[in-house]
Image (cartoon, rainbow, N blue to C red):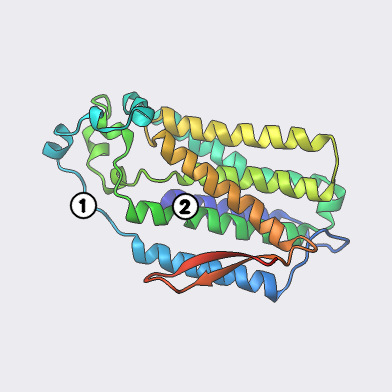
Amino acid sequence: MNRTRRILFLVLLAAALASRASGESPYRRGWSKDGRIAGVSAVAAVGAVLVSGTPEPLAAREIAGLSRESINPFDRGATWRYSDRIGDASDVLLGAVVIAPLALMLDERARADGETCMLLYAETMALAVILPAFGKGTVDRIRPFVYNPDAPMDRKTTSDARKSFFSRHTSVAFASAVFVSTVYGDYHPGSAAGRYVWAGSLLAAAAVGAMRYESGEHFPTDIITGAVAGSAVGYIVPRIHRAGGERLSLRPDFTGCRPGLALELKL
């Protein structure tokens, strides 16, 4: 939860530093778009609270009975990883990735539309932070370092040690990377610099994922799921706001037993 608060603080700081101005924009704001996204975020937050909880920490005897062989071969390598230093470094790199969209304010077109950019980014980050809570609250997956005898027992016996799926760090990192790359491309369609923005931002996001693996915090499938979820949010939010993007929308969904989200494409 402390990490989540730090991420949200950085988002709010980025919004506060952005300049207010007006000008031609490839995006359209309004209650039909932003009201729905606010509703989606609220529903997602409520749903996350409903499914989230504090799982019972593992007992020492339960940890002693765990076996790496019970982990699928693709994920098993993560059980040999553990490093507090790399885990702390992933927090620092994530902070840098989260504030990276401020670089858009160096661009004249984006700076003239700074208020809209920061609104879209705040919506993107809210969803990227909230979505992993559904996995953590419903999938009781033990973190890789719990299987590693080199990791301290006091880390293994926390409730957080049972919240491996899926990676919030990776979700947020890829949401930011895809957002900044998509938005830059919308302001500068066809620009050769766009490929470098994509490459640099995705490389930084992938580095966050790699650090979460090396620190023993997440399995590869946790990281891949976070990357997919974050990338989807980072693309969909700007796409919904793009001029002519009315065919695509997010809305709350109450058809199930818990609040959910629905993505609509009007043909």
User: Eyeballing the image, is 125 above or below 22?
Assistant: above
Q: Quadrant of the C terminus?
A: bottom right
Q: Which mark is residue 56?
A: 1
Lower sequence index among marks 2 and 1: 2
Instruction: Identify the residue at image location x=70%, y=46%.
Output: 180
Across and down, in percent, residue 8 comes to: 54, 55
Across and down, in percent, residue 46 comes to: 43, 69
Q: Secondary structure at mark 2?
A: helix
- Residue occupying the far front of the picture: 267
User: Eyeballing the image, is 200 above or below 9?
Assistant: above
Q: How many numbered callouts?
A: 2
Instruction: Say which amino acid is labelled 2.
Output: Thr
Question: Of 14 and 265, which appears nearest the observer?
Answer: 265
Which of labels 2 and 1 is toward the front? Answer: 1
Q: Which mark is residue 4?
A: 2
Res 218 visible = yes
Instruction: Say which amino acid is labelled 1.
Output: Glu
